[in-house]
Image (spheres, grey):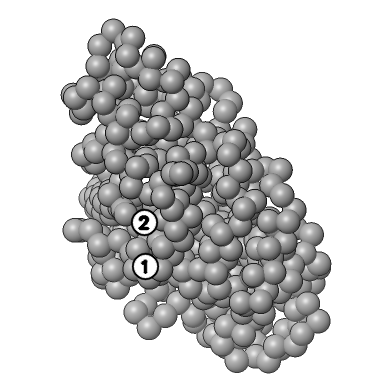
Amino acid sequence: MLNRPRALTAVTRFGLGPRTGEIDDIAHDPVGFVHDQCMAPKAAIISYPGIQSRNGLLDSYIPMFRESRRARREARRNGTSAEAEQRAQMAIRERRDLTRDILRQEIKARVAHGVVTDHPFVERLVLFWSNHFAVERKRSPLTRAFVGNFERNAIRSNVLGYFEDMLLAATTHPAMLTYLDNTRNIGPNSAAGQRRKVKAVNENLAREVLELHTLGAGGGYTQEDVIELANALTGWTGGVDLAHDGVFFARFHEAGDRTILGKRYSDRGADQIRAILPDLARHPSTAKHIAAKFAQHFVADDVSPALIQELETAFLETEGDLRELALVLVESDHAWVDEPKKTVPPYDFMVSAMRATDSPVPSGHQLARTTQSLAQGVWEPPSPAGWPSNDRAFLGGDSLLERVDYSKALASRIGGVGRVQDLAVDLFGDALDPFVAEAVARAEDQRQALVLLLMSPAFHRR
């Protein structure tokens, strides 16, 4: 007997919603459908016209950043010089236009990949880990320019690899270093620190690495561990001093051995943090923190403790193999409870609506505006903790009306999809809710029918 309910769970809880014919195609083996997606090592990689490599971004952004800074300094030196002020404003506008164009292209590439991918579970993994290592694009011009590259280089490249590799890539990426103020983390006794009369290290990145990215708030670290990690992170900068040969500058580094969680790490410059982060990545508290967060994100706020234990054990035994972590989740009976337990976040809903209707992807500018109107702007988390994942996180205020408005706008933009009654059957097969089918059939016209279909529970609960 074909397992239709599980097929629907496969494309919603572990995916980005159904595409036409998909439910029928996978009904014979829903678990295998999700499982096999993890065997595609390049499934998360985006190849899209116009997006730039990290070196390409450096070549285009850094000279313009330096020019705008030089122009501002010249304007300040010249006081009331109208010409100097005009040059400064022009340089700032050019930098703003560049970062805006880079960001819009990155947003379009991200959404377009989500809409067309044949590996939606892998894309869901990307969204989870990108939120785990949250970077807010509005923090600075550099984060706006580099946040898309951050997700592609640090998250997508490691999403089916090892956690320690993702942790190192995320922690030392220019976007994260800038977002969490490590550009201002200068060793007081370093060459630069003595010249600038620095009194103390900046703890922001170190604290979030311990509290959010690895051990968790109750993971057993102390304030002294935060300070020691912050000292080890001195020298890692994401600012104007960026160069192709790396983002570590010894003149900012606080020399000396560091003791973190009782283990001593010798001073080896940039290699000191490369020794510390793998130990944090493999720590039992990290396994516990990640397992609970992972299970609660995909399954339920009150997820079975047995599932969390399975994930924690897998994380520890494989030393943070993220492919194995995903496979344990997919293969656990605890993850396939029939009743939907989670609200679909606004971004995921937008992508699922476009997947279901085979909608063309609009411009990056339009997508940025749409996600903001849905109250989940791309790379705009409310804090370094990322977007909350509890079931009620996106149910406040006018969230339902915002989704209705988006559904109406999409129905108007694509001009219909034929008979929506047929589309509903193609999307859900025998899993189509009879109440939804009746509502669609009784709609005044096909656009209203499409809105009713997109607002049905299967698009908003998983």
> Which residue is found at the position 71% from the left and 74% from the top?
283
> Which residue is found at the position 54% from the left and 85% from the top?
270
Q: Is residue 336 visible?
A: yes
Q: Position of residue 190 (x, y in %)?
A: 61, 83
Frontmost residue, 274 versus 25: 25
The quarter of the displayed image where residue 394 is located: top right
> Which residue is found at the position 48% from the left and 55% from the top?
31
Task: Classify residue 265 as left or right of residue 125.
Answer: right
Q: Position of residue 417 (x, y in %)?
A: 21, 27
The quarter of the displayed image where residue 443 is located: top left
- According to the picture, the residue beneath numbered tag 1 turns out to be 40
Mark number for residue 119? 2
Circles 1 and 2, Cβ within 8 Å, touching? The answer is: yes
Q: How many numbered discs?
A: 2
Mark 2 neighbour density, 10 Å: few (under 14) some (14–19) many (20 or more): many
The quarter of the displayed image where residue 48 is located: bottom left
Image height check: is 178 above or below 41? above
Q: Is residue 405 visible?
A: no
Could you tell me the amino acid type at mark 2? His
Mark 1 neighbour density, 10 Å: few (under 14) some (14–19) many (20 or more): few
Mark number for residue 165? none
Frontmost residue, 351 versus 304: 304
Q: Position of residue 145 (x, y in %)?
A: 35, 57
Image height check: is 51 above or below 317? above
> Which residue is found at the position 57% from the left and 36% from the top?
340
Could you tell me the amino acid type at mark 1? Ala
Q: Position of residue 289 (x, y in %)?
A: 70, 60
Frontmost residue, 235 versus 441: 441
Image height check: is 364 above or below 293? above
